[in-house]
Amino acid sequence: MAVADLIASSINRYVGVWAAAPALVQLEATVVQWLCGIMGYPAGSGGLLTTGGSLANLEGIVTARRERLPERFLSGTLYTSDQAHHSVRKAALLAGFPEANVRSIESDARFRIRLDVLRDRIRRDRAAGHVPFLVVGQAGTTNTGAVDDLSALADLARDERLWLHVDAAYGGVFRLTGRGRRALAGIERSDSLSLDPHKGLFLPYGTGSLLVRDRAALRRSHAVRADYMPPMQEDPEFIDFCESSAELSRGFRGLRLWLPIKMHGIGPFERNLEEKLDLTEWIAAELRALDGIEIVAEPQLSIVAFRRVRPGLDDDALDELNRRFLERINAGRRVHLTPTVLRGRFVIRICVLSFRTHLDRMRMALEDIRSALEP
């Protein structure tokens, strides 16, 4: 992967326009088609490589806006879970929507979007003269790794005539595994999705992607002509990336994905992801066996959220107890766990997604958690 970046930087070819580097553009387009295949998208799908999920979410929302709303679009409303990554809200703002147009929908006990609340809010918005046009589902939230019921969400989007975008930046590539395919069932019915190969495929940072069911939608929403530009490709098999994204100047991102998969096949990536799921289930089982530990969010992919509990303490005291608990765990500098807030409670997260994380490191984490529990 580092070799791929060395080669790409050394040749320094421009790939924003097909005519400038046809072979390299086609290589990157091939990589995008591989990703579409992994996610179960049909023929006619496509996309582009981005710097990460934030830009992919922005491009996805802009595409949905251009496809589903008129030029005067400020009556449009979009919907997502209260567990959504902040990049979804930021993308909506950058796409021109007032913050009030972004509806944050309550999540259930498993931190998945509540479809009954979503349906009711869509109904009320339509009655008030708004134009619901987009729902953003979650395929692995940052807080807990929660996965919305994507099949049911796709049904709702179809019935309500909404564009369905799925934020799968963290969790999407788990679809390479059997457990991941079951957890992410329905994602293949989305209109677009964001995916971060620099997470689940263990690639260098700056390797994200936006995938769309109808690749022509990207061109319809992004293409702008200029006299100084060369003629753009009309053949759908030849892509001018400048007509499918906000970028004109862009680096050659495809080799860092193409080279390792060509060299090793997809099997090692699948096995690594299976291992991460196994390790997460293992640590969750060990945490359940510890006195004074509560699992706040059971693993749905490779994240588990937990906290320390002690009878007689109020919420504020429990939060402070867990802050000190986390500091003691991380003080050993062998592992690094991170916090978040769920339902107003300070909790601790274990996210297993590094290619360097194996059972030995998980045992270290468990040892440090046990030590931090001691008086």
Image (cartoon, rainbow, N blue to C red):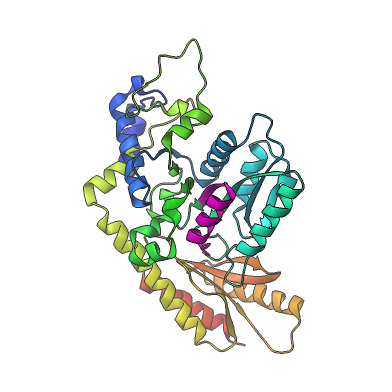
Camera-side residue of 343 and 272: 343
Residue 55 image offset from top left, x and y in percent: 53, 41
Say which quarter of the image contains residue 71. top right
Is 308 drawn above or below residue 341 in the view shown? below
* Residue stretch rendered in magenta on the structure: 146-166
Q: Is residue 159 visible?
A: yes
Magenta span includes 150: yes
In the image, residue 87 lies at what x, y percent? 60, 48
Judge from the rendering whether residue 216 lies leftward or rightward of residue 275; answer left or right: right
| Residue 264 rendering spot, x and y as whole percentages | 23, 51
* Front residue of 363 and 30: 30
**Side of 373 relative to 300 (left or right):** right
For this rendering, which residue is in front, 184 or 156?
156
State the residue at coordinates (70%, 89%). 311
Please give left or right for residue 141 compared with residue 205 in the image: right
At horizontal 62% and vertical 69% (from top left) the residue drawn is: 108
Magenta segment includes 242? no
Q: Left or right: 337 with respect to 201?
A: right
Residue 246 visible (yes or no)? no
Image quarter for residue 280? bottom left
Q: x and y percent of residue 241 in the render?
A: 42, 29
**Screen quadrant of the N terminus:** top left
